[in-house]
Image: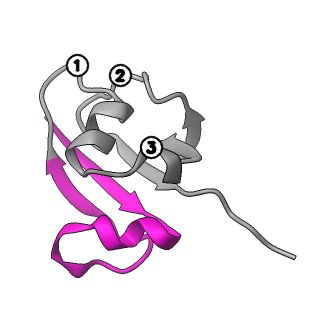
């Protein structure tokens, strides 16, 4: 199945093809893949993952994806 992936902030460095933050790229994943599976394939360090969204809704990393889903990964954000 095919999904769209967006990486934000410091996670952008793991995007294939040099995408900028928030720029979607297509990815083929097997049926039954989870948010955690995709993070593993992209080699996103677990300590750098704070939250993931599926179709603009926060979900746990064991969330099973569906064909056409758009997902986004965010690192912890600091600020002042």
- Look at 59% across and 47% down and name the residue there: 50
Where on the picture, by quarter, is residue 14? Answer: bottom left
Q: Which mark is residue 64?
A: 2
- Report which residue position mark 3 lands on: 46
| Helix, strand or loop status at disc 3 | helix
- Look at 33% across and 43% down and name the residue there: 39
Magenta residues, as a range? 1-27
- Numbered disc in front, either 3 or 2: 3
- Report which residue position mark 1 lands on: 32
**Whole-Å distance between the Cαs marked 1 and 3?**
20 Å
Left or right: 62 with respect to 29? right
Q: Quadrant of the C terminus?
A: bottom right
Foreground pick, 18 / 66: 18
Q: How is the image coloured?
A: one colour
Indicate yes or no whether the magenta region holds residue 15.
yes
**Whole-Å distance between the Cαs marked 1 and 2?**
6 Å
Residue 9 point in image, percent of width and height: 52, 71
Do tag 1 and tag 2 residues touch (Cβ < 8 Å)?
yes
**Mark 2, other Cα within 10 Å: few <14 / some 14–19 / many ≥20:** some
- Residue 38 to residue 62: above or below: below
| Helix, strand or loop status at disc 1 | loop
- Look at 28% across and 77% down and name the residue there: 19
- Look at 20% across and 44% down and name the residue there: 41
Residue 45 point in image, percent of width and height: 39, 50
Residue 71 point in image, percent of width and height: 40, 47
Left or right: 41 with respect to 75? left
| Helix, strand or loop status at disc 2 | loop
**Whole-Å distance between the Cαs marked 3 and 2?**
18 Å
């Amino acid at each position: 199945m095919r999904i769209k992936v967006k990486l934000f902030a410091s996670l952008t460095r793991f995007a294939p093809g040099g995408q900028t933050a928030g720029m979607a790229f297509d990815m083929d994943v097997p049926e039954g893949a989870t948010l955690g599976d995709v993070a593993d394939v992209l080699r996103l360090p677990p300590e750098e993952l704070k939250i993931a969204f599926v179709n603009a809704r926060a979900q746990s990393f064991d969330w099973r994806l569906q064909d056409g889903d758009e997902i986004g990964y965010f690192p912890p954000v600091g600020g002042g």
